[in-house]
Image (cartoon, rainbow, N blue to C red):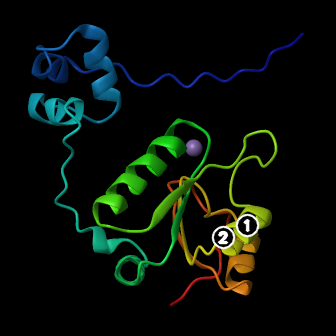
Amino acid sequence: MINNKRWIVPPLITPEVDTALSAFPPILRQILFNRGYTTDAEARAYLNAKPDFNTDPFQMSGMKKSVDRIQTAIQKHEPIAIYGDYDVDGVTSTALLVETLQQLNANVRGYIPNRFEEGYGLNNNALDELKADGVQLVITVDCGIRSPSEALHAQTIGLDLIISDHHHPAEGDLPPHLP
Ligand SMILES: [Mn+2]
């Protein structure tokens, strides 16, 4: 069998960065270098999960509207569902948002689609069930940006939808959104 593989090997650490990261073992130095951490301070901030949060989160598209909508839901005690994913980033992001909103006294639940019966991403049945259960606001984590037709369905059944997803949208095919 012919196996056509194309290996893309990241560049080798430079001597300067290797010296700067000398506090770390060699393999870790190489990985840190390939992830763009080239000073001891940057590497420590990254490894301690203390990234630079100086970036304004309101630069994100739709942030003000989303925050306003979530605050309204908290105030009115509207049921909120965090719609995640069954893999590691989907489950952890769901847990993180559910626990955070619980701290803020929100009426919030998590929703993880069944890997075998529902598969990845938003699906209309799940949105219908959440709506029937009284949910008024769905916030996606780790999915949604590639589900324009399901987003339209949410709009049709009167379910407010906030999409937070780290995936890339399909070219020219964004879900319907407010300006
Ligand atoms: Mn995921």
Quadrant of the snapshot with the N terminus: top right
Q: x%, y% of residue 168?
A: 58, 57
Residue type at numbered disc 1: Glu
**Local crowd size for mark 2, using a 10 Å CA cut-off: few (<14), some (14–19), many (≥20):** few
- Alpha-carbon span between mark 1 and mark 2: 6 Å
Name the quadrant containing residue 128: bottom right
Residue placed under numbered mark 1 in the picture: 129
The residue shown at (55%, 25%) is 8
Mark 1 and ligand 1: say if the CB distance to the nearest ligand atom is below 8 Å: no
The residue shown at (19%, 32%) is 48
Name the disc covering residue 179, or none.
Answer: none
Q: x%, y% of residue 50?
A: 19, 41
Relative to 60, does residue 179 appear above or below in the rendering?
below
The residue shown at (23%, 37%) is 49
Asked if disc 1 and disc 2 are in contact, CB closer than 8 Å, the reply is yes
Residue placed under numbered mark 2 in the picture: 133
The residue shown at (70%, 65%) is 147
Given residues 24 and 177, the one toward you in this image is: 177
Mark 2 and ligand 1: say if the CB distance to the nearest ligand atom is below 8 Å: no
State which image quarter holds ligand 1. Answer: top right
Q: Is mark 1 on a helix, strand or loop?
A: helix
Q: In this view, does 152 lie to the left or right of 7?
A: right
Relative to 157, does residue 90 appear above or below in the rendering?
above
Q: What element carries label 2?
A: loop
